[in-house]
Image (spheres, rainbow, N blue to C red):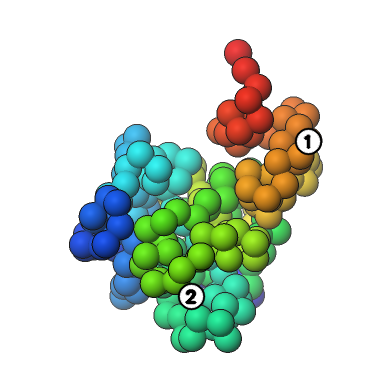
């Protein structure tokens, strides 16, 4: 059964990175948390803070989900990883994340409806937070980035909520394939641009990285 194992929100804290402040320290919370469509530079979760609003937050990055199974795979290398340690809002279990199709829709807890948007691209703040030299390269090579989601229907979310994949686009472009196109395999960008029903934000990012002008 696919479930939300933990809901995590972040307070602002100091960090020895360029920004000087971060909301990456997501801590598990008890009870339901309201999820709504954020403004142009906010989180979708009530009480969650984002500091680097240039690169994070907003409608297409309203919620960040990471698989508990992938955290478990990292533990032999990083040691024990609590829920939220990768800065994820939702630690999920039993649902494909890297293999999720861009644009597929997750119904969570009966009301909340989220749509898979873009993969997480690692940044230096992530490396500083984990205190790992070379972490951006290591995380990128591993290719398990987690996914951002946009909010289609607002609602509450809490640990234990069931996740049902209600719709999966036929184009088949996955979070993992999009991540590789954006990072280690730029030759894949042309294939992304060739998918007519790919989400506009993903198409725009692919075009930008490929240096292609779109009307």
Name of the residue lying farthest toward the front: 133
Q: Which residue is drawn at 48% across and 75% down?
A: 5
- Is residue 138 depicted above or below 61 in this figure? below
Residue 16, given in percent of the width and then of the height, sits at 27, 62
Q: How packed is label 1: few (under 14 Cα within 10 Å), some, or many (20 or more)?
A: few
User: The residue tagged with tag 1: helix, strand or loop?
Assistant: helix
Q: Distance between the residues labelled 1 and 2?
A: 34 Å
Q: Which of 171 and 159 is in front in this view?
A: 171
Name of the residue lying farthest toward the top: 215
Residue 212, given in percent of the width and then of the height, sits at 65, 22
Q: Quadrant of the N terminus?
A: bottom right
Pair 1/2: label in front: 1
Q: Mark 2 points at which residue?
A: 5
Q: Name the residue under label 1.
A: 191
Q: Residue at x 50, y 65 (%)?
A: 135
Q: How packed is label 2: few (under 14 Cα within 10 Å), some, or many (20 or more)?
A: many
- Is residue 75 depicted above or below 201 in this figure? below
Q: Is residue 79 left or right of residue 67?
A: left
User: The residue tagged with tag 2: helix, strand or loop?
Assistant: strand
Residue 17, given in percent of the width and then of the height, sits at 30, 57
Q: Is residue 58 left or right of residue 3?
A: left
Q: Quadrant of the C terminus?
A: top right
- Is residue 85 depicted above or below 165 in this figure? below
The dot on residue 60 is none
């Amino acid at each position: 059964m696919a479930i939300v194992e933990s809901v995590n929100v972040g307070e602002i804290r100091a960090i020895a990175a360029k920004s000087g402040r971060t909301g990456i320290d997501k801590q598990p919370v008890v009870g339901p948390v309201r999820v709504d469509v954020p403004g142009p530079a906010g989180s979708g979760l009530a009480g969650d803070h984002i500091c680097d609003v240039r690169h994070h937050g907003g409608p297409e990055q309203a919620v960040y989900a990471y698989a508990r199974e992938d955290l478990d795979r990292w533990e032999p290398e990083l040691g024990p990883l609590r829920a939220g340690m990768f800065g994820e809002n939702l630690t999920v279990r039993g649902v494909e994340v890297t293999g999720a199709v861009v644009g597929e829709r997750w119904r969570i807890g009966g009301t909340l409806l989220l749509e898979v948007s873009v993969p997480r691209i690692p940044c230096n703040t992530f490396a500083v937070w984990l205190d790992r030299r070379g972490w951006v390269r290591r995380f990128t090579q591993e290719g398990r980035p987690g996914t951002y989601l946009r909010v289609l229907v607002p609602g509450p979310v809490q640990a234990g909520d069931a996740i049902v994949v209600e719709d999966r686009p036929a184009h088949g472009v996955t979070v993992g394939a999009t991540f590789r196109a954006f990072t280690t395999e730029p030759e894949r960008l042309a294939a992304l641009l060739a998918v007519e029903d790919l989400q506009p934000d993903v198409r725009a990012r692919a075009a930008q990285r490929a240096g292609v002008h779109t009307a």
